Image (tube, grey):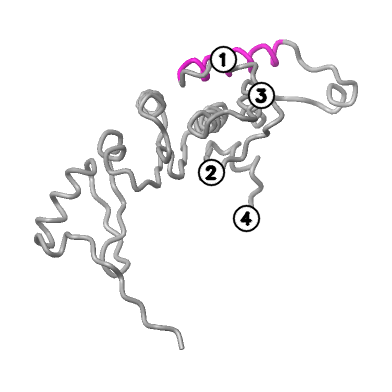
Amino acid sequence: LAVRPHGIASRGIARTFQNLALVQGLSVLDNVKVGAHCRTRGGFWSASLVVPSVRSERAVSARAMEVLERLSLAHLAHRPCAGLPYGTLKRIEIARALMAHPRLLMLDEPSHDLDVETLRALEDALLEFAGSVMVISHDRWFLDRLCTHILAAEGDSQWVFFDGNYQEYEADKKRRLGEEGARPHRMRYKALK
């Protein structure tokens, strides 16, 4: 990438990874606070003298606790991430992304391997999110509940943009392509020799 990760975050874009990128030895709260790094100010003297801005640190901690509460994670704030269930770690990573105050939040398979309670907390947090969310997901029910627009790859790598949720997109696809055309088909590739 031509732009470094902190530069992307400072432009209002945050993302999560399908493979989690949390620091296992840090507490949940500290992992979430890392997401605010692009929004904090620290000069040469404060860094070299190890004199953090107390007001800034308090504000970041308070904001992190608000985000943890919204995702039903506040009770885990001071526990280390190591050993927590995958769904919980996924929510922690989303909380960290939200700490950057992004205008665009990019989520890669956010509902993968989540239990129902965790999925509901995630859906509620995303519905409250004031910015735009771009989701890559195979979870049709998740897409149906949250998405207002669909960008889908159809047929022979044709991209279709649809204004509506997933269920509406599926109905439109059947209308455009017919029942047979709308069914998923296994792609056939030429054998390598």
Q: Main secondary structure of the magenta part?
A: helix
Q: Which mark is residue 65?
A: 1
Labels in figure, total:
4
Marks 4 and 3 in Cβ contact (< 8 Å): no
From the image, tell me which residue sits under label 4.
1
Q: Which mark is residue 17?
A: 2
Marks 4 and 1 in Cβ contact (< 8 Å): no
Q: For the residues marked 3 and 2, what is the alpha-carbon distance in whole angstroms?
A: 20 Å
Q: For the residues marked 4 and 1, what is the alpha-carbon distance in whole angstroms?
A: 32 Å
Residue occupying the far bottom of the picture: 193
Q: Is 48 above or below relative to 107?
A: above
Under tag 1, what secondary structure? helix
Say which amino acid is labelled 3.
Pro
Say which amino acid is labelled 2.
Phe
Q: For the residues marked 4 and 3, what is the alpha-carbon distance in whole angstroms?
A: 31 Å
* Picture coordinates of residue 67, whole percent (x, y): 51, 19
Q: Earlier in the sequence, mark 3 or mark 2?
A: 2
Q: Which residues are magenta?
A: 55-70
Name the mark nearer the viewer: 4 or 1. 1
Name the mark nearer the viewer: 2 or 4. 2
Q: Earlier in the sequence, mark 1 or mark 2?
A: 2
Toward which corner of the image does residue 181 lie, by quadrant? bottom left
Toward which corner of the image does residue 117 lie, by quadrant? top left
From the image, tell me which residue sits under label 3.
80
Asked if residue 57 lies in the magenta stretch, the reply is yes
Q: Residue at x 65, y 16 (%)?
A: 78
Circle 3 packing at 10 Å, graded few (<14), some (14-19), many (20+), is: some
* Picture coordinates of residue 132, whole percent (x, y): 40, 36
Name the mark nearer the viewer: 3 or 2. 3
Q: For the residues marked 1 and 3, what is the alpha-carbon distance in whole angstroms?
A: 15 Å
